[in-house]
Image: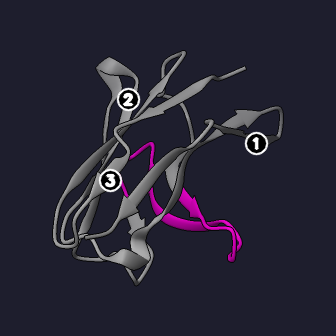
Amino acid sequence: QVQLVESGGGLVQPGGSLRLSCAASESIFSINAMGWYRQTPEELRELVARITSDGSTNYAASVKGRFTISRDNAKNTVYLQMNSLKPEDTAVYYCNADTPYGLGSIDYWGQGTQVTVSS
């Protein structure tokens, strides 16, 4: 079982930056993909950014050009650099690991970290 621990959330003013980190309890080298999702009380959890084992990335349209996902396999950590933050980016951000399991895969989730963008 993969354990994921997020950190780096907090309060930031509009236009500011934050970097989220997600530390995995084991090697992420063979994990299919890792991603960041976010959720507010009013909305369903949505994909923010995802990075596959070969380094391919995809982003939600609302964050493209502002957010960057990256991974450090040596540290078993995935990052989300968030720039030009907007109030609508306020949410709980969750780290996800899509891991091989038998002929399929299984998802693991972190506990979430709050990001609040407000003046």
- Could you tell me which residue is drawn at 34 percent across and 26 percent down? 73
Q: CA distance from mark 2 to mark 1?
A: 20 Å
**Disc 3 residue type?**
Leu
The answer to whether residue 32 is above or below residue 90 is above
Q: Nearer the viewer, residue 118 or 1?
A: 118
Compared across the picture, whether 106 is left or right of 6 comes to right
Q: Mark 2: which secondary structure?
A: strand
Q: Is residue 117 above or below residue 108?
A: below
Where residue 15 appears, x then y in whole percent?
Answer: 16, 72
Disc 2 or disc 1, which is closer to the eye?
2
Residue nearest the viewer, comparing 54 with 16: 16
Q: Nearer the viewer, mark 3 or mark 1?
A: 3
Measuring from the top left, give residue 92's x and y in whole percent.
Answer: 54, 55
Residue 13, located in which quarter of the rendered image? bottom left
CA–CA distance in space, label 3 to label 2: 22 Å
Q: Which residues are magenta?
A: 37-56
Q: Quickly name the residue at label 3.
A: 11
Residue drawn at point x = 48 percent, y = 19 percent: 27
The label on residue 77 is: 2
The quarter holding residue 111 reads top right
- x 24%, y 51%: residue: 18
Could you tell which of marks 3 and 1 lies nearer the N-terminus? 3
